[in-house]
Amino acid sequence: MHNIEINNLTFAYQKEHPVLQIDQLSIQLHRFTILHGPSGSGKSTLLKIIAGFLPRHGGQLNGEVQIPHHLQIAMMFQDPGMQFALDTPRHEIEFALENLQIPSVEISSRITAALKQAGIQHLADRLFTTLSGGEQQRAALAVIIAMDADVLLLDEPFASLDNHNRQILIDSLVQLQKAGKTIIIADHDLTGYHQLVADIVSFQEPIHRLSHDQAEFLLDQASTQLIRTPLPRKNDQPAITLSNYHLQKQDQVLIDQSNLTFMRNRVTLITGESGSGKSSLLLSLAGLLNYSGIITLFKSPLNTIKPKNLGKKVGLVFQRASDQFLNVTVAEELSLSRRQGKQTYFTHERLNSWLKRLGLYKMDDRVVYSLSGGQQKKLQVLLMLMMGQPLLLLDEPFSGLDRQSTANIVALIRACQEHSGITVLIVSHQFANLSHLVDYQLLLKNHTLTYQGRNQA
């Protein structure tokens, strides 16, 4: 057997409708295969089946998955933080290699090579808790590279990466594939893959491999959409001001800003390279990370606002959706946001309409942690919009979402913003579909935030 063969496969959690159905699929070894399709279509589920995690850890599988016995398989999860056992990238790689019983004389050189290939030599001894989401993704990939497995399964490996670092890692994967590795990637975003000789499996039902021409067309269409925004108007009112603001983690300076204003009742996009400090900025604005200087929120110094009152003014959508949930089921989460939320936009009819549009309708009994990464993200954003705080901070709210899901979340944010006049700050590496949402754009570069665009007439 020279391929991974899948026949008459169905997989379901408990007695629910199958989340994955494949009549026949052959994945060729020593090639790139990209699993492409909308959120919740089963891409991650297939990777977990190939890796052997399912049905061992839940669910009912019927059908046949044939994998050559000699193959060693390694998987990078959609949420890399779930697979780290130790404190730093160096220790994590060392731990993985020791578990594989790699001779001690080889371990040091393999660690160095993997760190270099993932471009994180400078992060080798940093605590994972101080790394950004994008840096954690690169660290997880370094672990996979060091293990030297035959088959690499990568679940949304670039979701939190800027385009520059995304391209660097894709180039690294190209070299691995040329060295004989089989690389299977689940990704809704095909940006940067155009130089690959890759098979694309469409997860639009029925799940099938695209022809060469169909794959070429999709890859050619994938491109980064630039956003053109004006500079703030002179009559814009301030929501937040930073004065002599300084933010750092350990000995690393992230932001050093003498003065900056975030505009009230506007949607502002914050961009910059992975690890530059964007997520840390949001945490400090939410009162969850120490800083020096002055943050003024709606005319009040942030450090004078009691935590209970701050929670009524500021909502934060975490980068990891699972960190946001407080209950077990979708129904319980919705019920909590209904009781505590202040957003008047969500009438009963509107909420049901949005649940249908987001593909979350009639999922009341689903355990939130059994949802796909994209479904979790859509639910997370909806729940926080229902809370109705006048300032909403969103950290990578489109991570793991296909274009249609992104467009739906954009429409949802805009509808709430126009209804209630909330102020929205968004950190995102994904620009597609954002042109109709974003009013202003800030670039974080060289420790400074600068508005991008031209003066308005």
Image (spheres, rainbow, N blue to C red):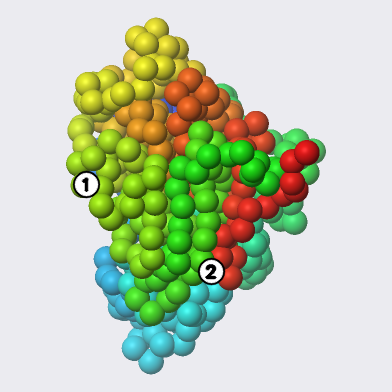
User: Reading the chain from its start, which is encountered first: label 1 or label 2?
Assistant: 1
Residue name at image x 75 percent, y 56 percent:
195
Three-letter residue code for mark 2 = His
Residue where numbered disc 2 is placed: 447
Residue 322 lies in quadrant = top left
Q: In the depicted view, which residue is nearer to us: 406 or 309?
A: 309
Residue 233 lies in quadrant = top right
Compute the Cα span from label 1 to label 2: 28 Å
Residue 318: image location, x then y, percent: 37, 46
Indicate left or right for 349 with 4 as reference. left
Three-letter residue code for mark 1 = Pro
Q: Residue 449: tell me if it is visible.
A: yes
Residue 361 lies in quadrant = top left
Quadrant of the snapshot with the C terminus: top right
Residue 430: image location, x then y, percent: 59, 46
Q: In the depicted view, which residue is nearer to us: 371 or 442?
A: 442
Instruction: Using the image, determine if residue 1 lies above or below residue 369.
Output: below
Residue 127: image location, x then y, percent: 33, 72
Instruction: Using the image, determine if residue 294 lies above or below residue 145.
Output: above
Residue 190: image location, x then y, percent: 65, 45
